[in-house]
Amino acid sequence: MYNCTIYDAFTGISPFEKLGVIKFLELTSNHSKEVIQQSVDYAVKDCPSFGGYIFSVNFEKEPIAVAVINKSGIPGFQSKNILVQFNIEESWQTIEFIKYFFGKLIALTNKDLSLQLNADNPNIPLLQEIGFVPKALEFRYSATKAEADKAIEAIPSTPIPASSLKKKRKKKKSKLRVAV
């Protein structure tokens, strides 16, 4: 039925296979070839990184779904594995196949997987059905040059001493309470 292949720093990936993964993602996603190339290189440690995985599902030797997972290197702060690139061929985008695909990714990462989506992504209900839950809200600074210059001008040039910000508080004596 399906042929699943996992590439990482230990198994490696041939230049031909790497080109196939990049081409598939480039043709089926909105990301640039450079961004896709960087995430693939990071996953297989072709650049300094914590590594990750490339997971490819093929049907009759043609890729029908590909995922690039990068390891974050920050255990405890966020997920150890971040799904940075993925796509499924349009004709294979059924609920059953999507659940199969994500089930494989979740198992591959020992249930420690996260991904970032735009708030208006129509697939959020399906991902929540699979078991993903929203955990954080990301803010990115994004402004035109004029807006950035205006915002920077509004920042005080001299920091306010921390001592002037603290209120004088009376020390309260703590009472130890013991239940009997």
Image (spheres, grey):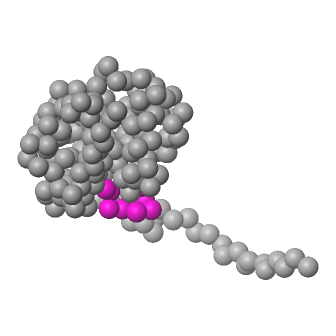
Quarter of the image with the N terminus is top left
Question: Can you say whether 53 is above or below 139 in the image?
Answer: below
Name the one closer to the observer, 138 or 169.
138
Name the one closer to the observer, 107 or 2.
2
Question: Can you say whether 47 is above or below 25 in the image?
Answer: below
Inspect the magenta stretch and tell me whether residue 125 lies in it. no
Count of number-bearing discs: 0
Quarter assignment of residue 83: top left
Q: Furthest-right residue in view?
A: 180
Q: Main secondary structure of the magenta part?
A: loop
Residue drawn 39% across the image and 51% down it: 108
User: How far across and how far down the image is residue 2, in percent?
Assistant: 33, 35
Quarter of the image with the C terminus is bottom right
Quarter assignment of residue 80: bottom left
Residue 21 in sight here: yes
User: How far across and how far down the image is residue 139, in percent?
Assistant: 37, 41
Left-right relation of 21 to 5: left
Left-right relation of 33 to 124: left
User: How far across and how far down the image is residue 21, in percent?
Assistant: 18, 38
Name the one closer to the observer, 113 or 166.
113
Residue 31 in sight here: no
Task: Give the residues drawn in magenta, as a range.
Answer: 71-79
Residue drawn 31% across the image and 56% down it: 71
Q: Furthest-top residue in view?
A: 91
User: How far across and how far down the image is residue 48, in percent?
Assistant: 16, 61
